[in-house]
Amino acid sequence: MMSSLLSPQILEEFSKEDSSEDTVASAVKVARNAYEHWKDVPITERSKLLRAIRSQLLRHMDEIVDIMIEETGKVVTEAVVSEAVVSCEVLSYYASNAASILKTRSVYPGLLINKRGYKRYEPLGVIGVISPWNYPLVLALGPVATALAAGNAVILKPSEYTPKTGMLIGSLIAKAGAPEGLVQVITGHGPTGEALVRSGVDKIAFTGSVRSGKAVMRAASDTLTPVVLELGGKDPFIVCRDANLDRAARAAVWGAFTNCGQTCMATERVYVVKEVYDVFVDKVISLAAKLHQGTAPSDDVGAVIHKGQLDIIDRHLADAVERGAKVVCGGEHVDVGGRPSMEPTVLLEVDHSMAVMREETFGPLLPIMKVEDEDEALRLANDSQYGLNASIFAKDRRVIDKLVAGLHSGNVCVNDVMISYGIPALPFGGIGDSGFGRSHGPEGLREMAHLKSVAEDRFGFSREPSWMPVPTWLAKAVKTGLDLLYRPGSDRQDSVDRNGTPIRMYINSKEVEVG
Ligand code: NAD
């Protein structure tokens, strides 16, 4: 019989605990000891551990999926397709690519041809990973595996709503053969997370809300602990006049309602060019009306995680309706496996005065807005403090390129939705209130490494020309050399521009003439 990852008693007991500051401090101490050994383990060996974790994940998939469903109310397809697949992909990508991504690289030394410059990527030490509840497997295992690949020890603090999934992740990493203490799990609410931020770890990889992200950054500033912040979103979805409307409608429905809308890169607002608005809306309504919500394996949409999240969804819905929005599908509460939830809901006649178009809803609301043209769609898409992901549905290459370039967003999907996160080689992260730093791709691994720049003398002469005592001819010779190398050819006066207008600059907000 297959052995389980952790006994139900252990899961029950620890899931209720809030680790204290002292517990966190002891965990960091143990992690530091484990790090002293792990940092010298060759990358090829670290890659073996990642592959072994992947094997353990596959072996214990059902157990982990069941716990995720118990903790979040998500449907089985979401747990397997969105979480397990991306987890395996991230493990495989770094197992195969960590060595080349972290290899020492030479740089061109410029004028200093007697020097060699190179960049080294070294482990940072102990990384604190703080994760949310909405994708409790991939958003915890992903950063933990990345930190391990870069040679660090890790302390994982899973969400207080999904502590058991977090503990199972720790257990499968131990079963995969990780040295004792290299990966530890601490359970608890926000204050436990804050204790981790303040504990002297070498970096925090945080995924969660903007509010908590700001608190993490404030706490981290005391110790100048670097942070990666993967925060919320209000992702726009643009439908252009030449879009494949069947694909766009299905994508919008999946993007808005998968995980019951509780995805950082969910489709939270749709802008449709007026010529195709009616057809697109009809397609969306007919698809949304057929969705099955519940806990059965055949269901499409699961539950809202808890009452607090439902309250936010209710507030956005009520505010939209009060300001003139029309509910054309859903809009009622529904019980999903004992959790009070919201039906998949489509809203029309929406505008940017409404919270549903401006604040992160994190629930199954799909507001659709008619726009004049692609330019208006772009302007409205960018009218947001968030910038995580965006979707464009169009065929014309020029329109696609213009929208891709114009979107204020960390990630863009073209004729697709949310899929950028599924490509492990593609760096993922936000701009604006959606945070900074990247997970996935080479950049995601290098986030977990210390970049050391080395300049090395090549010839070993007993002095350099600029060392003291400085020769009196040096400054003049260097000026002549720079002139020969870089001086512009024109003898145009440089206190006026090419139209003869005096050139100005600002000092202390006052305009002064240059020259
Ligand atoms: P949350 O901010 O409430 O909690 C996230 C984690 O932070 C939890 O582990 C929590 O205990 C911890 N935490 C809370 N306060 C803290 C503090 N002061 N110091 C340290 N840790 C603290 O978020 P949530 O409700 O679990 O998750 C939903 C949010 O996460 C949404 O806003 C969603 O958009 C965002 N999210 C972002 C991404 C991304 O990759 N950008 C992915 C998933 C979710």
Image (cartoon, grey):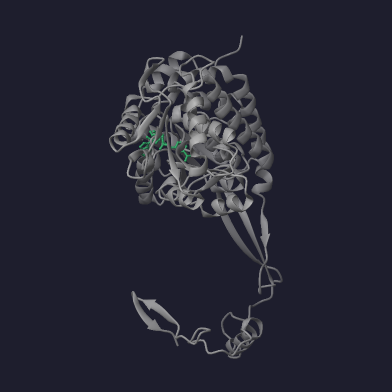
Q: Is residue 136 visible?
A: no
User: Where 118 sits versus 145, above or below?
Assistant: below
Q: Quadrant of the N terminus?
A: top right
- The percent coordinates of residue 116 (x first, y second) are 68, 65
* Quadrant of the image where one finds ligand 1: top left
Q: Which residue ends up furthest to the right in the rendered image?
A: 459
Which residue is nearer to you in this view: 398 or 277?
277
Q: Which residue ends up furthest to the top in the rendered image?
A: 1
Q: Is residue 122 visible?
A: yes
**Residue at coordinates 49% horizontally, 87% vertically from top-left?**
500
Q: Which residue ends up furthest to the left in the rendered image?
A: 322
Q: Is residue 262 left or right of residue 152?
A: left
Total residue callouts: 0
Q: Quadrant of the C terminus?
A: bottom left
**Residue at coordinates 34% horizontally, 35% vertically from top-left?**
325
- The percent coordinates of residue 262 (x first, y second) are 44, 31
User: Where 57 sits versus 21, above or below?
Assistant: above
Which residue is nearer to you in this view: 432 or 403?
403
**Residue at coordinates 65% horizontally, 38% vertically from top-left?**
93
- The percent coordinates of residue 254 (x first, y second) are 52, 30
Which residue is nearer to you in this view: 196 or 25?
196
**Residue at coordinates 48% horizontally, 86% vertically from top-left?**
496
Q: Is residue 261 left or right of residue 148?
A: left
- The percent coordinates of residue 441 (x first, y second) are 61, 44
Which residue is nearer to you in this view: 191 or 488?
488
